Amino acid sequence: MKIHEYQARELLREAGIPVPPGEVITSIEQAAAAYKKVVGEAGLGDGGLAVVKAQVHAGGRGKAGFVKLVRSPEEAEQAARFMLTHRMVSAQTGPEGLEVRRLLIAAGVEIAHEYYLAITTDRKSRRNVLIASAEGGVEIEQVAHERPDAIVREPLHPLLGLQAHQARRVAFALGFTGRLATQAADVMMRLARLFVEKDCTLAEINPLVLTAPQASSPKAPAPSVLAIDAKFNFDDNGTFRHKDIQGLFDPAEENPAELRAHAFGLSYIALDGNIGCLVNGAGLAMATMDVVKLHGGDPANFLDVGGSASEEAVTEAFRIILSDPRVKGILVNIFGGIMDCAVIAKGVVNAAREVGFTVPLVVRLEGSNVEAGRKLLKDAAATLPTLQAATDLGDAAKKVCAAVG
């Protein structure tokens, strides 16, 4: 589960991590008042710097023109008008882009340096790890690829979490000293606790900034460490423990087909190909997609109906797959372990008849009572002209790839 930046900033604030004042708006008319409010709270006064940022579940906002610096209510309104009336297109959205429904207007700060800070899980070591870099504000993958020595990694103890001495060591490695090192280490400790307490899979601050000294103003605050942008992902299997996190879910940012699948207990992820896949078992689904690719096809989805899917669930799975206009053919790959293949075949045929097919449907069955299941498929082909039975997975992949050209 993902949340918006403004929600992530609020989580940081509640955890005691300092963030600049911000205000969320949903209309152009709210922009001017929001600008005045945030610069006033920050003590910036007339002409103070603020930033207007689109709130979508995708990166690349700055390059797409959906992060803008403003210094007046008029500029804030102009930026809001552009973002709320255009779809955001970036490398992460695809050419269709995303509709922008919310904007964050936040107080700007003078930045002396930007850092990267995150907690995530290292699957290789099977431990949570703190990742930090003195080269923040850019994509961390790019830094890791081009300058791996610029990345600091500190594993967390499985029971004790991040220890104070580890946080201080990372702060010093990033170049912080004295009071600022203490502030940076405190942010790391609080972020690590938040990561565990909320069952996160990723807790990221990018950038964590050191504010610039403002010697021209004797009343200006001393340089400090602030979190400017944040990103949180949560383990779906743990959200039942966190009603507050569940309340942050924004269905408008999710694929409608994936939401429909979830309601029926199906695991569905939309992809970019044209061959729909309906499989029972996540491992088998991955193998099915691999074999489709091997034979020159391109999967349109990952869809796991589980080991005991009902006829109703299979019917809905077909509807979900066919709701994607790119799908030109469907491959059903079912292994009947506990389930009887004849029962599975009957369910697939009945679902196919109810939904109605205009694209090729290739079905491969294997397992208990498979011969009876295959006979049912063969008999059904007389009234379902798009249906083909396959003898094995390779045969099925060849047939569906040939059918879609």
Image (cartoon, grey):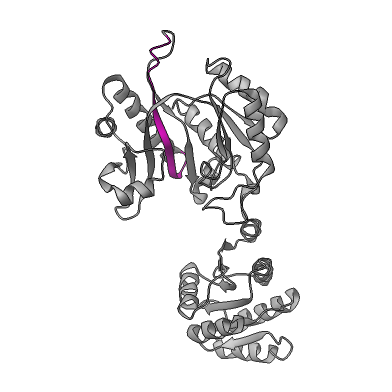
Q: Nearer the viewer, residue 386 or 50?
A: 50
Q: Is residue 205 magenta?
A: yes
14 over 397 or under it: above or below: above
The magenta stretch spans which residues? Answer: 198-217
Q: Position of residue 402 (x, y in %)?
A: 57, 85
Q: Residue at x 34, y 28 (%)?
A: 184
Quarter holding residue 169: top left
Q: Residue at x 29, y 53 (%)?
A: 125
Q: Nearer the viewer, residue 22 or 190?
A: 22
Q: Is residue 367 visible?
A: no
Q: Main secondary structure of the magenta part?
A: strand
Q: Position of residue 361 (x, y in %)?
A: 64, 81
Q: Residue at x 68, y 91 (%)?
A: 379
Is residue 152 left or right of 75 when viewed as pictured?
Answer: left
Q: Nearer the viewer, residue 21 or 66?
A: 66
Q: Position of residue 292 (x, y in %)?
A: 50, 77
Quarter holding residue 94: bottom right
Q: Is residue 283 magenta?
A: no
Quarter holding residue 7: top right
